[in-house]
Amino acid sequence: MQIPFVRAVLPLLAAVTLSVPCQVAHAQSGATPAGGRDGQSDAHGVPSSAHGGPSSTQDGRSGAADGRSGAQVYAAVCAACHDSGALKAPRFGDRAAWKPLIAEGQRALTRTAIRGIRGMPARGGDPTLSDREVARAVVYMVNAAGGRFSDPR
């Protein structure tokens, strides 16, 4: 029977179908990466210190050798679902939605983001992301919702 195949493929198809228009809309919105031009906050009003840490440059990047910052990964990958709440993703900055996830702890939540869960594919659907980049995106989103996770080193 092909039902298991359909159950496995349908969420992925839905994720792709929903994420492409969201990514285009996000790109067209003119949102800036972490730190913006003034280095104070990103497009969502999150302080640069919440996602960059002391090793970050003014624009929120952690350097090419370390990969992208949490804000950069969020803008490129995660915002497609977390800005709109697509596929029941907790919306960016929604303290109530993130509270139980924050309670799981940084290590468990990062592991879940790397592996994927329910409608969220592994690494948010971008297999090129390193574990550290995924971890930074988790920290960025959690801290925007009131968490106090520390930047992975």
Image (spheres, helix red, strand yellow):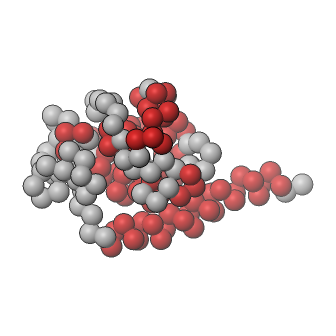
27 vs 41, nearest the viewer: 41
Residue 20 location in percent, x, y? 49, 68
Query: Which residue is farthest right?
Result: 1
Tell me if 6 is positioned left or right of 40 in this view. right
Tell me if 101 is positioned left or right of 153 in this view. right
Residue 133 location in percent, x, y? 36, 42
Residue at 56%, 51% in the rendered image: 88
Query: Which residue is farthest front?
Result: 96
Residue at 36%, 51% in the rendered image: 74
Locate the C terminus and report the quarter of the image it occupies. top left
Could you say which quadrant of the image residue 47 lies in?
Answer: top left
- 119 over 113 or under it: above or below: below
Q: Can residue 59 be seen? A: yes
Residue at 36%, 41% in the rendered image: 145
Residue 71 location in percent, x, y? 29, 49
Could you say which quadrant of the image residue 6 lies in?
Answer: bottom right
Locate the N terminus and report the quarter of the image it occupies. bottom right
